[in-house]
Image (cartoon, grey):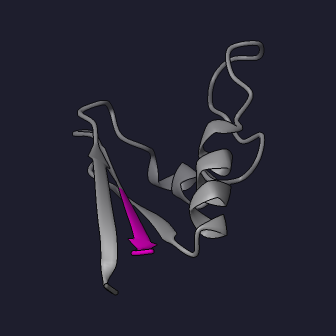
Amino acid sequence: LGGDIWIHVKDSGPGIPEANLERIFDPFFTTKPVGKGTGLGLSIVHRIVSDHHGTITVTDNEPRGTVFNIELPQA
């Protein structure tokens, strides 16, 4: 087999401000108001992808959305 599997997730939201891009995978980092989010979602995704020997990167197209690129080795 061999090779890699690529998954691209794209949205059309407002994008991620450049100042936040370095922290989006940090546990408990959130830009939501208190009580409206834990800041765990992307850190959990990052951990799952890493545990499967993959990588996740983000391409921001502020203000036209965000693209998450996941690369996983084929089993």
Whole-percent x, y for residue 70 in the image: 40, 62
Left/right placement of residue 57 relative to residue 4 reads right
Residue 62 can be seen, yes or no: no
Of residue 41 and residue 71, the one placed in the foreground of this image is: 71
Q: Quadrant of residue 53?
A: bottom right
Q: Is residue 14 above or below residue 68?
A: above
- Tell me which residue sits at (40%, 70%) in the image: 71
- Tell me which residue sits at (34%, 87%) in the image: 2
Of residue 14 and residue 9, the one placed in the foreground of this image is: 9
Q: Among all residues in the image, which is located at the extreme bottom?
A: 2
Q: Among all residues in the image, which is located at the extreme front?
A: 1
Q: Is residue 70 magenta?
A: yes
- Tell me which residue sits at (59%, 45%) in the image: 42
Q: Is residue 50 above or below residue 12?
A: below
Whole-percent x, y for residue 43 in the image: 67, 49
Left/right placement of residue 35 relative to residue 21 reads right
Whole-percent x, y for residue 30 in the image: 67, 34
Q: Is residue 73 magenta?
A: yes
* Image quarter in which the C terminus is found: bottom left
Whole-percent x, y for residue 12 in the image: 23, 33
Q: How many marks?
A: 0
Left/right placement of residue 11 relative to residue 49 reads left
Q: Is residue 37 above or below residue 7?
A: above
Q: Is residue 6 above or below residue 13?
A: below
Of residue 15 and residue 6, the one placed in the foreground of this image is: 6
Q: Main secondary structure of the magenta part?
A: strand
Residue 9 can be seen, yes or no: yes
* Image quarter in which the N terminus is found: bottom left
What is the span of residues highlighted in magenta in the rendered image?
69-75
Of residue 54 and residue 31, the one placed in the foreground of this image is: 54
